[in-house]
Image: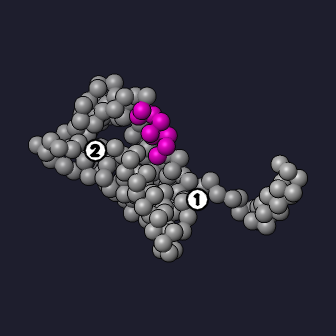
Amino acid sequence: MTVIVLLVATVAFRLLGLAGVRRFDTWRVSAAHGLAVMLVMTASAHFVPGDVTFMPNYDDMVAMVPSFVPFPGVMVYLSGVLELAGAVGLVLERTRKAAGICLALLFVALLPANVNAAQLALEDVGSPLWQRIPEQVLYIGIALWGAGLFTRSANRPAAVDDQRVASDQGSGR
């Protein structure tokens, strides 16, 4: 479900860009905003009371926390706050890079909880391990890409790349 939210939000933002909303004129920025939407959705589960059963809730999140992590309830709230802060950071251009890096680190830190949920086969929040790890890798990649870390090197001006592309096209490569 989270991947679907991420993809639909990203495409919706990009379509807004194509419709003239300059903020979303690139896939990279649209993906950063799409990840922010997904994070608001996932973070909300950290604060939903345990008696709510139509979506993952606080009790479900606590059940995911591996036994070696101290204060699981506090960690659930903390990770929810960090996800929300990361979402805000992705939306603000001046904080996007720092937010993307911090979110990538958070996704790595949360991986043991996701693995634990898959191993325990928790129905409300669990998905198979074969699905969990690729999802985390996807989120890490989008956080870093959305932050602008996989863009053209600052030491290599666009004109150099444009010349290389033109020579590659002229030589039939």
Residue 88 percent location from the top left of the image: 39, 63
Q: Image height check: is 121 above or below 136?
A: above
Residue 130 as seen in the image, left or right of residue 127: right
Q: Main secondary structure of the magenta part?
A: helix
Residue 76 - label = 2
Residue 82 - label = none
Residue that carries the numbered disc 1 in the rendered image: 148
* Mark 2 residue type: Val
Please check the rendered image and state whether residue 72 is part of the magenta-colored stretch, yes or no.
no
* Quarter occupied by residue 27: bottom right
Q: In the depicted view, which residue is nearer to us: 137 or 71? A: 137
**Viewer-side label of 1, 2:** 1
Residue at position x 50%, y 40% in the image: 137
Does the image show residue 139?
yes
Residue 46 as seen in the image, left or right of residue 162: left
Report crowding for label 1: few under 14, some 14 to 19, many 20 or more residues within 10 A (C-alpha). some
Q: Image height check: is 111 above or below 78?
A: above
Residue at position x 19%, y 49% in the image: 48
Magenta region, residue range: 131-139
